[in-house]
Image (cartoon, rainbow, N blue to C red):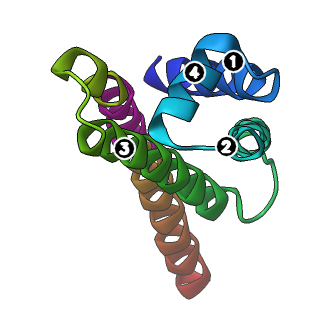
Amino acid sequence: MSTTFILISMFVSGILDIMLNKSILVNAKRLGFSTYFVRTIGVLKIIVCLGYFWPFRFSEKIKKLIYFGFFIELFIGLLCHICNGDTLLISIFPVLFIIPLLISYYTFLYKLSDSCDFEHKNNIASTKIKKSL
């Protein structure tokens, strides 16, 4: 559930960044970012959201990088708001996305460890069968 929330919110945020939504553009200008930076971040958000569904061999490593990238983006956003002297109500906004991101990441790690345990148990079972033959 938290993964879906993060992916949808980042995808929509990426689209709004590319379209240069007025409220995002005003906020970016106030923080000192240019329009091409906002569009670049938007394109990267969309690419990363689509990359989450990478079905190939290194998908676990790619997903870890995706979680790290989202965390860095949100954490830097939090720091920018704090350093700019924004009120607590505005500064807390990135934290509202960092919390579900961390929940999603730990859920991902838990599922990953379960699949590794399952593969390890299968390898042990197959070696025992081979030794008994």
Going by the numbered disc 1, the residue's amino acid type is Val
Label 1 or label 4, whichever comes before in sequence order: 1
Q: Could you give the CA–CA distance between mark 1 and mark 4, rounded to whole angstroms?
A: 18 Å
Q: Residues within 10 Å of mark 1 (few under 14, many from 20)?
A: some
Left or right: residue 105 versus residue 3 is: left
Q: Quadrant of residue 39?
A: top right
Mark 2 Cα-neighbour bin, 10 Å: few <14, some 14–19, many ≥20 = few
Of the residues shown, which amino acid type is indicated by label 3? Answer: Cys
N-terminal label among 1 and 3 = 1
Mark 2 vs mark 1, CA separation in Å: 20 Å
Q: Are marks 2 and 1 in contact (CB under 8 Å)?
A: no
Residue matched to label 2? 34
Q: CA distance from mark 2 to mark 3?
A: 14 Å
**Left or right of residue 102: residue 129:** right
Name the secondary structure under disc 4. Answer: helix
Query: Dot 4, how many residues are within 10 Å of its Cα: few (below 14), some (14-19), or many (20+)?
Result: some
Amino acid on which disc 2 is placed: Ser
